[in-house]
Amino acid sequence: MKARVLSGVQPTGNLHIGNYLGALKNWVKIQYDYESIFCIVDLHAITAYQKPEELRSNIHQLAALFIASGIDPKHSSILAQSSVPGHSELAWMFTCVTPLGWLERMTQFKAKSEGQEIIGDGILQYPVLMAADILLYQAKIVPVGDDQRQHLELTRDIAQRFNSLYGETFVIPETKLPLVGARVMGLDDPTAKMSKSATGAGHAIALLDDPSAIRKKIMRATTDSNPTVNFGNAGPGVVNLLSIHQAFTEWTDGQMRTHFEGMRYGDLKKTVAEAVVEGLAPIQAKYKEITADPGYVPSILKEGAARVSPIAQETVELTKKRMGLYSLA
Ligand code: AQP
C-alpha cells in the first residue's frame, strides 16, 4: 500500500505564486507516488472573519486552481475540510492533550495576535486543527512551504504525546519542503513572506493575474542600489526574483549563474516576468476550461469527501477507543 500524502490551502483570497511554488507545484510532482489528499481548509479560514458568500466562492475557485495546476482528481482526493466532520472531532481530542505553552510559542500565533485587542481562540488552536488534518489520514508526508515548518513540528509533538499517553495510534509525519521556492517573498517588500492577506497592490502575483499585471508587478519589484546581478552580494529582492525564476524554470544553479551574473536589473526583471507569464499560462487556460462547467468542481469536492471519509471515520473511532470515549460502533 502506498504511503499517504496530505496538504492544504486556506480559501482566504487569491492564490499567489508563493502558494504555488511552495506547495502546489510540489504536490503535482509527487501525487502519483502516494495516496494523495489535498484539502481546502475552510475551517482554518474562519479563524479570521470571512464573508460567507465569498468563502463559498473561494472554496470553488481554489478547488478549480488545484486541478488547473495539475492535481489529478481521478487519482488525488480534493475536498473541503468542513465536509469531513472527523477534522473537528479529532481537533478537540488533540486540544485536550496539547499543553497551552506549545501553542503560545508558535511564531504565527505571535505574529497574528500582535497588537490585536481581541485574540480569537481559533488563532491559538489553528495548529491543533492542522495536526488533526494530517493525523486524521495517518499521512506520512506533508508537502508545505517553509512557513509551516514549525506547525509540522508541533503536529509531530502532538502525535508523539498522544502515542505515549494512549498507545501507538498515529503515524509520525514528515515535512517535505521544495528545494527552491519554499519561501517566496513579497515583491514590494522582500523581507516579508508573500501572503494572500497582504494588501499592497504590488505585493503578490496571483495565479490568475493577466500577463500585463504580472509584468507590471515584477518590473516594479524592490531590488537594491546595485545596477547588475552579483551572485556573491545580491540583496533579498534580487535573490527573491532569481529564486522565482529558478522555481518556475527548474534551471540548475549553474544555468542560473551563467545566464544572470552581471545582468542589469531591468533585463533580469523582464526575464523573470516572461518565465512567470509562461509558467502560469497553461494553468490559466485550464482554469478557464474547468470553470466553464459550474457543476464540475462541486462534483469533485463531493467525490473527494466521499473517498476519504472512511479513512477519517476509522481514525476517529480508533482515537475514541484509545481515549476511552463512548462509541456506538
Ligand atoms: N510566500 C510563500 N512562499 C512559499 N510557500 C508559501 N505558502 C504560503 N505562502 C508562501 C504555502 O502555501 C500553502 C498554503 O498556505 P495557506 O493559504 O494555507 O496559509 P498561509 O501559509 O498563511 O498562506 P498565505 O498566503 O500567507 O495566506 P494568508 O495571508 O491567508 O495567511 C502552505 O503550504 C504554505 O506553506
Image (cartoon, helix red, strand yellow):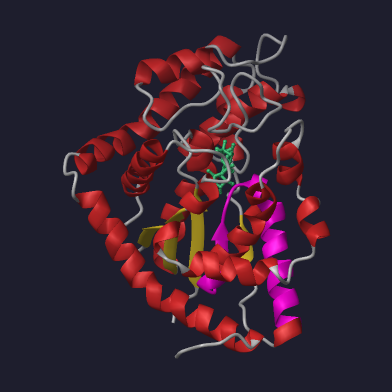
Whole-percent x, y for residue 301 in the image: 31, 57
Whole-percent x, y for residue 283 in the image: 32, 38
Which quadrant would residue 200 be assigned to in this image?
Answer: top right
Quadrant of the displayed image that contains ligand 1 = top right
Q: Can residue 303 be seen in this view?
A: yes
Q: Could you tell me what secondary structure mostly forms the magenta stretch?
A: helix
Q: In the image, what residue occupies the spot 51% across and 88% down?
A: 327
Q: Nearer the viewer, residue 152 or 261?
A: 152
Which quadrant would residue 226 be assigned to in this image?
Answer: top right
In this picture, is 151 found above or below 318? Answer: above
Whole-percent x, y for residue 174 in the image: 63, 65
Q: In the image, what residue occupies the spot 76% across and 30% down?
A: 115
Q: Which of 199 and 259 is in front in this view?
A: 199
Q: In the image, what residue occupies the spot 36% across and 63% down?
A: 77
Whole-percent x, y for residue 6 in the image: 50, 62
**Residue 249 shown in magenta:** no
